[in-house]
Image (cartoon, grey):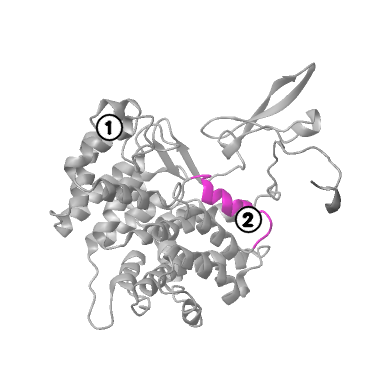
Amino acid sequence: MTAHSTSLKIGDKVVDLPVKEGSIGPAVVDIGKLYAQTGMFTYDPGFTSTAACESKITYIDGDEGVLLYRGYPIEQLAEHGDFLETCYLLLYGELPTPTQKSDFDYRVTRHTMVHEQMMRFFQGFRRDAHPMAVMVASVGALSAFYHDSTDISDPYQRMVASMRMIAKMPTLAAMAYKYSIGQPFVYPKNDLDYTSNFLRMCFAVPCEEYKVNPVLSRALDRIFILHADHEQNASTSTVRLAGSSGANPFACIAAGIACLWGPAHGGANEAALQMLQEIGTVDRIPEYIKRAKDKNDPFRLMGFGHRVYKNYDPRAKIMQKTCHEVLGELGIKDDPLLDVAMELERIALKDEYFVEKKLYPNIDFYSGITLKAMGFPTDMFTVLFALARTVGWIAQWKEMIEDPGQRIGRPRQLYTGETRRDYTPMAQRK
């Protein structure tokens, strides 16, 4: 990383601030000593212009529609690899050799079962609890069941905790789903691959044999790859902030899941599907397109455009293809919701308003349709997102812990409240 400096003039004072350049992407102005030199902070709501850390994991170029995991384009990883290969890449920085891949798959597969007492833990939830509420609680509770891997200063324990979370998250997610629909839990099987195992735990029942559809398994595996990491988004930043205090990894990931639950973040694909349900039928689309274009109408088209990508989301291209593969495999032809989605997609890709504002269908638009077709209810969508993003959170957490320059996160503020005033006794207040 190269560095030079730039000058900032505040009143009559000129201060020199280091400028750091990464291997790719925008340079950053290091304002670490700004307060000491000027007595001032910067003001950046949402941290949209602030680099909070140095990272080697994921790179996004929103203007060009580029997403790289450790330098590899997301399109190549989704097309040629599988999810566990992507997990290895994010964790260790390189694609695995055949021996490393075999060993990694083995270690993950042999850690998929959860402590049997977790079964009783689940019984404490109401039957109608949202699966994300169950995930926040059960992942946070892992530190009570696996307290032999919570010492973050021990590299071996960090490794064990990382493997446990990647391995157990599908089991917990499937348990959350099964509990919500009143079906018995299905134990994992070691002879199945990661995604096929998860599908079986979700949709198998004890009274009959369940055969995993390879097309659906491959599609879900691709969805997991696409969601595995996305640089310093809200939930990842939450995991890093929680981890900066020295909190155990299970607590940090639970914090990330809680943040992901928000409709502006992980709940976006659920919101997109709810929008399609609101539109209802193809003949009502023009009415909603008109409303979306009206600045005075609060209605917004969900699943279009992206805060970071000002071009077509590279993940959406892959997701679009995957979506059509799944619909073709399942032979779904008479679902009015999917009819609405496909027509809305066609219009959005051609309508001048959408093209001019670059409101392309995003990954949430296609993933919501795909997951619904596969049989997942909408309240499971964000759970699947959390399952996939776990490896990204862990890789980011691990990188932060091993960074010698890491300090506890402590954002500043612009205070606009009352200035100092003296306490008035109750009897004197009017």
User: What residue is rendered at 57% in x and 34% in y?
Assistant: 22
Q: Which sits in the foreground, 79 or 340?
A: 340
In three-dimensional space, the C-alpha distance between marks 2 and 1, rounded to whole angstroms, equals 43 Å
Do callouts 2 and 1 mark residues in contact (Cβ within 8 Å)?
no
* Boundaries of the magenta span: 231-247
* Residue holding disc 2: 242
| Rendered-image quadrant of the N terminus | top right
Q: Position of residue 107 (x, y in %)?
A: 46, 70
- SS for dot 1: helix
Vertical side of 411 occupied by 257: above or below: below
Q: Which sits in the foreground, 416 or 422?
A: 422
* Residue holding disc 1: 290
Dot 2 amino acid type = Ala
User: What residue is rendered at 13% in x and 54% in y?
Assistant: 334
Q: Classify 10 Å Cα crowding around label 2: few (below 14), some (14-19), many (20 and above).
A: many
The answer to if 360 sits in the magenta stretch is no
Whether residue 251 is visible: yes
Q: Position of residue 144 (x, y in %)?
A: 60, 75
Q: Classify 10 Å Cα crowding around label 1: few (below 14), some (14-19), many (20 and above).
A: few
User: What residue is rendered at 56% in x and 71% in y?
Assistant: 141
Badge nearest the viewer, 2 or 1: 1
In the picture, residue 310 is in which quadrant?
top left
